[in-house]
Image (tube, coloured by chain):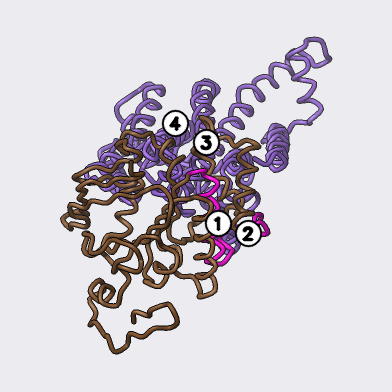
Chain colours: A brown, B purple
């Protein structure tokens, strides 16, 4: 049985249709990359899968169960969300931000125990940012904040990680480090789903690529099948510029 | 939760309370106060009956209720302010955001025009505050856009509506007796804080404070934004409703005790955040203690600085504005 099943889902903001009659099945394990131009509905699709937004038509099922029937806390134990890097108003310690990932496991008043603290520390360790744990979240760099948010998702204990443009706003080095972390997570049997604006990133870490255009799926398949110069050109509405396509070693450059 | 700052704030508050018991137009020695309480509670002691009578009236009927009233108001406003700032992810938000103070002021004015009994006026004050917040929340619901921005706009509309209604009541009030009473009351005033009122409101205020403080961890998560909080397993609507209810209850009750006291709910959470950081498990109790201490001190100033007594609302505003300007310069420590 598929882990997450989207069945004929539609979603609109006001009158603007964002997702139309979309079907998608996500299996356990592996990395799925979601590619698409701005406004194609990538982020909306992620939020629908997470149960943060609810579709106006169709259904979202997690392990065969309608996601709306799963209590918020239970859902958060199974699905973790890594939002786009942000800087909210308050400078909590990095450790405290990661500890928030334990909220779905905490008791009635959200008290954290020794286990929660240990798991938060382990998650920091795993992302290689233990040295930041006492620093205010507002005073670390964008790359460090992204690592913090992933650590929080790991502390959450969910096996499925949903990342919204994790490489956005990071410099080249941090982008590569982040992709390495994603690969490492895949090795550890996490199921990852991420959106990106870089076809190269999708090619590098994903097992499956879904191309989204105007709220509908344009292509769905292995990176080798999907991330081709022709498809990328169609997806982003560019001229298929074959003369620029060349091969660098094994890796075809699309543009 | 960090226990040390809490302990320090508690010691500070108790010191301020004791010192304030001594201060007044009729100053008292600390030794005399302590022997009064010993004699009152355990009997014996050497104070003559007349002196005891005087002290009993002065301490138990006048100063202590007033100090407790100031403490309750300060704690209630500072804690609701801190909770709202976390929930709306905006450090410039005050407890009056959803219109509770305008609503309660309108209720008070209306009560003063229509009711003779002070208890009825208090009830009208409280209901006015609750009504204004209901209007704000209701408006936000009408547009069916979730998120805090509609709540903020609902609060702006509701606040303006009740401010206009207050003007209407003032205009219609008898200009010789009722109008001065209304205006004087709305300046914020502790001189009418009698023992009965203080006793009556102290339990619900403490309950409201308790609810807010127990929600502290959830407020931490909520201050990362609604969607993230939902993904972290928080029932956003439920927590928000609980916090708004508790904050509205206690803020409306502060107007019941002493009219509209501004600025406390904005400044004290800022200072507390600079001292102990943004973690609400520590921030909310420290805000409560600092708010209580601050308002007692301000009330001492209002009582003693001049030959006549100043309404406390004027003093909080006059002290608050420069304080706020000072704080803003350093404020980047706790938020960006």
Judged left or right of residue A66, residue B122 is right
**CA neighbours of label 4 inside 10 A, class few (<14), some (14 to 19), many (20+):** many
What residue is shown with label 4? B256
- Count the numbered circles shown: 4
Question: Is the same chain shared between marks 1 and 3?
Answer: yes
Residue B82 at least partly seen: no
Name the residue at 32% across, 39% down: A67
Q: Residue furthest bottom?
A: A243
| Picture layout, residue A241 above or below residue B288 | below
Is there CB contact under 8 Å for labels 1 and 2?
yes
Question: In which quarter of the view is residue B325 placed?
Answer: bottom right
Question: Is the same chain shared between marks 2 and 3?
Answer: yes
Picture coordinates of residue A38 (x, y %)? Answer: 29, 68
Q: Between marks 2 and 3, how big is the CA–CA gap?
A: 23 Å
Name the residue at 54% across, 43% down: B310
Residues in magenta, as a range: A129-158
Checking the image for residue A129, the label placed there is: 2
Q: Between marks 4 and 1, how big is the CA–CA gap?
A: 46 Å
**CA neighbours of label 2 inside 10 A, class few (<14), some (14 to 19), many (20+):** some
Q: Between marks 1 and 3, how big is the CA–CA gap?
A: 19 Å
Is there CB contact under 8 Å for labels 2 and 3?
no
Picture coordinates of residue B113 (x, y %)? Answer: 31, 31
Helix, strand or loop for disc 4: helix
What residue is shown with label 1? A148
Judged left or right of residue B239, residue B19 is right
Question: Is the same chain shared between marks 1 and 2?
Answer: yes
């Amino acid at each position: 049985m598929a882990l997450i099943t989207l069945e004929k889902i539609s979603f609109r903001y006001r009158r603007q249709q964002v997702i139309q009659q979309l079907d998608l099945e996500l299996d356990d394990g592996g990395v799925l990359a979601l590619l698409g131009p701005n406004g194609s509905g990538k982020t909306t699709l992620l939020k629908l899968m997470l149960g943060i937004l609810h579709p106006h038509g169709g259904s979202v099922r997690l392990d065969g169960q309608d996601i709306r029937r799963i209590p918020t806390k239970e859902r958060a134990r199974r699905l973790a969300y890594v939002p786009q890097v942000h800087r909210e108003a308050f400078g909590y310690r990095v450790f405290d931000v990661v500890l928030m990932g334990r909220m779905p496991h905490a008791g009635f008043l959200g008290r954290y125990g020794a286990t929660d603290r240990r798991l938060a520390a382990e998650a920091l360790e795993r992302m290689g940012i233990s040295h930041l744990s006492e620093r205010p979240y507002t005073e670390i760099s964008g790359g460090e904040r992204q690592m913090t948010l992933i650590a929080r998702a790991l502390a959450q204990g969910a096996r499925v990680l949903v990342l919204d443009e994790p490489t956005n706003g990071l410099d080249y080095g941090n982008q590569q480090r982040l992709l390495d972390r994603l690969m490492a997570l895949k090795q550890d049997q996490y199921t990852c789903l991420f959106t990106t604006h870089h076809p190269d990133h999708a090619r590098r870490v994903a097992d499956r690529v879904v191309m989204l255009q105007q709220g509908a799926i344009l292509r769905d398949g292995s990176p080798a099948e999907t991330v081709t110069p022709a498809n990328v050109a169609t997806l982003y509405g560019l001229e298929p510029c074959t003369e620029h396509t060349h091969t660098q070693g094994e890796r075809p450059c699309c543009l | 939760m960090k226990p040390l700052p809490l302990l320090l704030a508690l010691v500070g508050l108790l010191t301020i309370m004791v010192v304030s018991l001594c201060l007044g137009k009729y100053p008292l020695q600390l030794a005399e106060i302590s022997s009064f309480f010993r004699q009152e509670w355990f009997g014996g002691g050497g104070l003559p009956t007349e002196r005891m009578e005087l002290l009993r009236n002065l301490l138990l009927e006048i100063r202590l209720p007033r100090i407790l009233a100031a403490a309750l108001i300060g704690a209630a406003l500072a804690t609701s302010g801190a909770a709202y700032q976390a929930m709306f992810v905006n450090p410039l938000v005050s407890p009056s955001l959803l219109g509770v103070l305008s609503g309660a002021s309108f209720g008070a004015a209306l009560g003063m025009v229509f009711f003779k009994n002070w208890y009825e006026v208090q009830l009208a004050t409280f209901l006015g505050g609750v009504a204004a917040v209901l209007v704000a929340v209701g408006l936000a619901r009408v547009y069916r856009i979730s998120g805090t921005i509609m709540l903020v706009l609902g609060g702006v509309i509701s606040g303006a509506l009740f401010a206009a209604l207050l003007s209407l009541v003032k205009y219609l009030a008898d200009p010789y007796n009722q109008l001065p009473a209304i205006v004087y009351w709305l300046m914020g005033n502790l001189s009418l804080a009698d023992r009965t009122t203080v006793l009556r409101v102290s339990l619900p205020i403490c309950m409201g404070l308790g609810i807010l403080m127990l929600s502290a961890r959830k407020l931490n998560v909520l201050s990362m934004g609604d969607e993230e909080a939902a993904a972290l397993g928080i029932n956003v609507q439920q927590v928000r409703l609980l916090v708004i209810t508790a904050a509205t209850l206690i803020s409306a009750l502060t107007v019941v005790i002493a009219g509209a006291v501004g600025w406390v709910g904005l400044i004290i959470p800022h200072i507390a955040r600079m001292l102990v950081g943004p973690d609400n498990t520590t921030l909310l109790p420290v805000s409560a203690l600092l708010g209580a201490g601050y308002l007692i001190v301000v009330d001492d100033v209002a009582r003693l600085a001049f030959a006549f007594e100043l309404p406390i609302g004027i003093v909080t505003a006059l002290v608050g504005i420069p304080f706020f300007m000072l704080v803003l310069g350093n404020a980047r420590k706790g938020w960006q």
